[in-house]
Image (tube, helix red, strand yellow):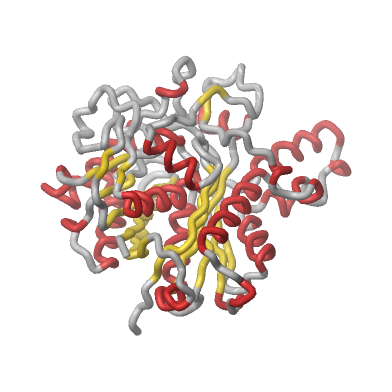
């Protein structure tokens, strides 16, 4: 069976540097940093007192009061980003066969804020005070459910959960659903909102996040020798994928073409990547092969680039293993240097950013790159964006549990 071609016709995101696509992109190109002191709770007694929070987000600007009470913050982010993606797509669902439109939107952790709040009620006031909305607020699939209900979309509908690879898996699964004819349009992505006492203390206990509290804007420093952990972030990214002929028939704006995906497992360790990024090598190879391109065609890699010692070293090694001499001709950047690590939302957000590098012929930088690490010796687009034509790019996402995803995107 010949696979159908899939294009990106809608994008939406909310991040620590912008509450929509335009503001996020302009901030990234300017090298703006979204990391600061935690305001969502009192972090005075925590080892980490900094995070990449979404700024100036008022749920009452987007939802009725009774809706806000039923929606965890991660679901609010997902719905707002989905609305932006739908608006940008120009889709009129009244004219579409909604049975052929699906939703795959995941979250790495789900409604941790709701869990924490309701658990406090349980301990303080007893089980009768738990909200009847608690379970449907918390479960990771609920954002996908709400998006499908908002627009009455009745195609494939579920959530992926694979830690920091979650929304990259969502986008890849939606791509395959259209390629193989299960749907004509897929709304895909992820959302996360875990900047809360349990989230921060949990990552602190693992020694996974930065404690550079005196310099929040300098704390996320992928590939830099002085990196000391990632910065926890929050937000959402949603893409609308569409079968090419369907998009052309309705005169849709096409941002780029989804070209290939690679899914692998490290089967190695619960949190550390496999030595040399072995699983990442295979994911990137599979994605490039799936696209029908060669590795020499890749112009840009949006790296997973978490700012942790293990990830950055192993991802660099993986790129050099697969691309050989071409690795030194590539541009590689980590936008987590500016927006932090959005966990389950990061894959979709970074797929959108990768798409925008193609649309705008601009590669956003890796900021805070000041002390080169001898083990990380590629061109990480240090500190300043560059103007360069990008025809074919890949985006990497790796999750605790050994989940690896590579998404390939090309100019249409």
Q: In this view, does 140 lie to the left or right of 328?
A: right
Q: In this view, does 333 lie above or below 82?
A: above
- Snapshot quadrant of residue 409: bottom left
Horizontal side, residue 358 vs residue 137: left or right: left
Q: Can residue 163 be seen in this view?
A: yes
x%, y% of residue 249?
A: 45, 78
Using residue 20 as the reference point, say whether residue 286 is left or right of it. Answer: left
| Location of residue 30 with respect to 81 vertically, above or below | above
Which residue reaches farthest right? 128
Front residue of 201 and 180: 180
Task: Name the residue at 56% across, 33% down.
Answer: 53
Q: Which residue is drawn at 65% across and 46% down?
A: 111
Residue plotted at (36% across, 57% down): 407
Rendered view: 71 above or below 6? above
Query: Residue 16: percent from the left, percent from the top?
Result: 52, 36
Q: Name, please, the residue furthest toward the front.
A: 251
């Amino acid at each position: 069976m010949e696979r159908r071609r899939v294009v990106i016709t809608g994008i939406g995101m909310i991040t620590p540097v912008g509450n929509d696509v335009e503001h996020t992109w302009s901030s990234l190109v300017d090298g703006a940093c979204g990391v600061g002191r935690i305001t969502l709770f009192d972090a005075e007694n925590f080892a980490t007192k900094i995070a990449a929070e979404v700024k100036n987000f008022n749920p009452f600007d987007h939802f009725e009061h009774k809706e806000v009470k039923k929606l965890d913050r991660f679901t609010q982010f997902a719905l707002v980003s989905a609305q932006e993606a739908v608006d940008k797509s120009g889709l009129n669902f009244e004219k579409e066969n909604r049975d052929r439109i699906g939703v795959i939107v995941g979250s790495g952790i789900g409604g941790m804020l709701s869990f924490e709040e309701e658990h406090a009620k349980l301990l303080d006031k007893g089980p009768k005070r738990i909200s009847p909305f608690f379970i449907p607020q918390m479960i990771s699939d609920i954002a996908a459910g709400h998006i499908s209900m908002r627009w009455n979309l009745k195609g494939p509908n579920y959530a992926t959960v694979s830690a920091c690879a979650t929304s990259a898996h969502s986008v890849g699964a939606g791509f395959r659903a259209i390629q193989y004819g299960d749907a004509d349009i897929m709304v895909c992505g992820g959302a996360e909102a875990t900047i809360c006492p349990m989230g921060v203390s949990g990552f602190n206990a693992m020694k996974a996040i930065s404690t550079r509290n005196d310099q929040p804007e300098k704390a996320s420093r992928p590939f830099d020798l002085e990196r000391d952990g990632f910065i926890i972030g929050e937000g959402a990214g949603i893409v609308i994928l569409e079968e090419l002929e369907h998009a052309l028939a309705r005169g849709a704006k096409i941002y780029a073409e989804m070209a290939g995906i690679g899914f692998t497992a490290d089967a190695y360790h619960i949190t550390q990547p496999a030595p040399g990024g072995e699983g990442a090598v295979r994911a990137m190879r599979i994605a490039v092969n799936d696209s029908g391109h060669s590795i020499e065609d890749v112009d840009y890699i949006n790296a997973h680039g978490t700012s942790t010692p293990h990830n950055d070293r192993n991802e660099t090694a993986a790129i050099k293993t697969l691309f050989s001499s071409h690795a030194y001709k590539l541009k590689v950047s980590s936008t987590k240097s500016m927006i932090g690590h959005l966990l389950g939302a990061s894959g979709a957000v970074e797929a959108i950013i990768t798409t925008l590098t193609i649309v705008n012929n601009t590669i956003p930088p890796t900021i805070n790159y000041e002390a080169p690490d001898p083990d990380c010796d590629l061109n990480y687009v240090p500190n300043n964006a560059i103007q360069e034509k990008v025809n074919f790019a890949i985006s990497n996402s790796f999750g605790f549990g050994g989940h690896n995803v590579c998404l390939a995107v090309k100019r249409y």
